[in-house]
């Protein structure tokens, strides 16, 4: 979606950094996966920032997870499905293994 906007709906923005985060729990363990990447026409001199941004995000996410006074967070992922135009759409976040075993 962002890629389409960059190539078709703007003439002033050439690239963007897109970040997403997913939290998942099995009731005992919780994981938080995050991903960030540049899209569009990224100048060579900007590319080294990807590693630095990832390091900063990892540091801040770790601080947030271990902070005793962390604020509210989004709900954990759960399977979803719906029926639209004679088709069934579904997504399952998968099983998070129990680390106690």
Image (cartoon, rainbow, N blue to C red):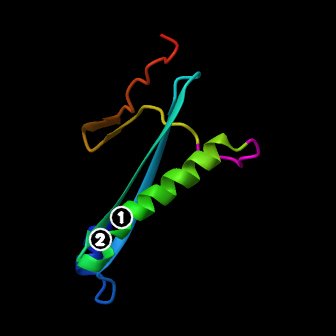
Mark 2: few/some/many CA within 10 Å (<14, 14-19, 20+)? few
**Residue 28's disc number:** none
Residue 31 x/y as whole percent? 50, 34
- SS assignment at label 2: loop
- SS assignment at label 1: helix
The residue shown at (25%, 38%) is 87
Residue closer to the observer: 11 or 51 = 51
Residue 48: quadrant of the picture:
bottom left
Residue 43 x/y as whole percent? 25, 80
Quadrant (top left, top right, bottom left, bottom right) of the N terminus: bottom left
The residue shown at (37%, 69%) is 49
Q: Residue furthest right?
A: 69
Residue 63 x/y as whole percent? 62, 48
Residue closer to the observer: 85 or 39 = 39
Residue range corresponding to the magenta coloring: 68-74
Mark 1: few/some/many CA within 10 Å (<14, 14-19, 20+)? some
The residue shown at (40%, 23%) is 95
The residue shown at (70%, 44%) is 67
Residue topped by disc 2:
47
**Majority secondary structure of the magenta segment?**
loop
Residue 99 x/y as whole percent? 49, 18
Picture layout, residue 25 above or below residue 42: above
Picture layout, residue 29 above or below residue 7: above
The reply to whether callout 2 and callout 1 are in contact (CB within 8 Å) is yes
Picture layout, residue 1 above or below residue 16: above
Magenta-span inclusion, residue 69? yes
**Residue 50's disc number:** 1
Residue closer to the observer: 91 or 98 = 98
């Amino acid at each position: 979606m962002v890629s389409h906007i960059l190539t078709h709906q703007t003439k002033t923005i050439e690239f963007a950094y897109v970040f997403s985060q997913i939290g998942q729990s099995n009731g005992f363990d919780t994981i938080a996966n995050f991903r960030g990447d540049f899209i569009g026409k990224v100048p060579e001199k900007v590319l080294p920032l990807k590693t630095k941004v990832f390091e900063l995000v990892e540091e801040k996410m770790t601080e947030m997870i271990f902070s005793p006074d962390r604020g509210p967070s989004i709900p954990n992922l759960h399977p979803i499905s719906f029926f639209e135009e004679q088709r069934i759409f579904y997504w399952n976040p998968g099983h998070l293994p129990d680390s106690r075993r």
